[in-house]
Image: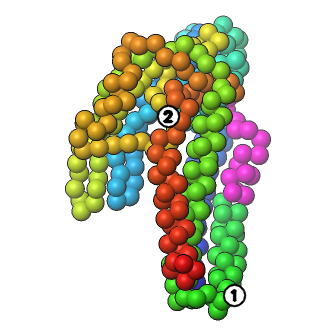
Amino acid sequence: MDVELKFLIVGFACAIAGGLSFITFVKWREVQAMSHWLPAPGKIISSRVEAREVRRSGVGSDSSDTTEMRNFPAITFEYKVGKKKFQSSRYSVKENLGNFEVTETLAQFPTGAEVTVFYNPADPGKAVIERTLPDGAFKFMVKLSAGLVIGTVVLVFLLGGVLEAIRPHLPKPQNLGAGALLLFMGLMILRMAFVQKSLAEQASKWPVAPGRIDSSGLQALRNYSGHRRWSTVFKSRIVYSYGVAGQHYTSDRVTFGATVTALMPGLVSGQARSYAEGGKVDVHYDPANPASAVLECSVRGLWLLWVCSAAFLGGAAWLVGFI
């Protein structure tokens, strides 16, 4: 492995670690500021599940803007500062990206519960109930950033030594670099296939709840295909709702695996036709996290992952002369 490539990989790891460190510092500053906020008695006036449409922006030479439905704990509380009453829905300094600890949060802050609220004395309209992060959160992020850099350095130079050791024993040693890259990509895709297959197998054992198709149709996406060109592609979009333990959840995941898009709507409309709006469906939900659900316990495009993995691994073997 060339020295330039080694330093490029290490530099990339340092950039990621730097980004993580910056995010950690910003959150630390926020927590430090909240430590000076004043307490006030408060009361939970609403505690429920709220479905939100979250936008995901792709990156790279072939990317598109798409959305997905996620469930969030929606906690609203009221409190008094002096004689003035306030309401807030930001219950914690912790970030929640959706479909995470929804049930636990609702159980922690049930409707009607008396709580201690911490408000900003300079702006009493800003308040939270939880103003600290879990113990060791900042230390974990610092260790993660440092471990990423150190681990990358060790791996890169160790891998370089291993490659140099096996080079003389290969039929085509001049292709070792390209072969190692294809081997890595093939193993990553193979791992992805096994992970998706395992998720589908686990989902087949999840409990089933009755659900309803809220909307079914096609979603138009702006797709960047390189050369500074944007085009419109389509994907099927099925949104359904279901109830677990008295809470109402919403999801749009039909299967596991990749999202299929096409330039022509007719190529991806089959799934939408299979789930008519207003129809009844069986929803498989994760008993440990009811916000996570799926309609079909299968992996879309799993065969393609197997084929791609075999192609990359076979290409690696061919490049170094084993085939």
Farthest residue toward the top?
112
How many marks the image carries: the answer is 2
Please say whether residue 153 is one of the residues in the magenta stretch: no
Farthest residue toward the right?
135
Quarter of the view holding residue 222? top left
Tag 1 secondary structure: helix
Q: Residue at x 53, y 18 (%)?
A: 282
Q: Residue at x 60, y 43 (%)?
A: 197
Please say whether residue 128 is one of the residues in the magenta stretch: yes
Q: Nearer the viewer, residue 38 or 281?
A: 281
Residue 94 lies, with reference to residue 170, above or below; the image says above
Q: What is the magenta range?
A: 123-144
Calculate the distance from the C-alpha at mark 1 to the C-alpha at mark 2: 44 Å
Please name the residue that numbered disc 2 is placed on.
255
Q: Position of residue 286 (x, y in %)?
A: 64, 27
Please name the residue that numbered disc 1 is placed on.
165
Quadrant where the C terminus lies?
Answer: bottom right
Sooner in the amino-acid sequence: mark 1 or mark 2: 1
Any part of residue 19 in sight: no
Amino acid carrying mark 1 in the image = Ala
Q: Position of residue 202 (x, y in %)?
A: 66, 34
Quadrant where the N terminus lies?
Answer: bottom right
Amino acid carrying mark 2 in the image = Thr
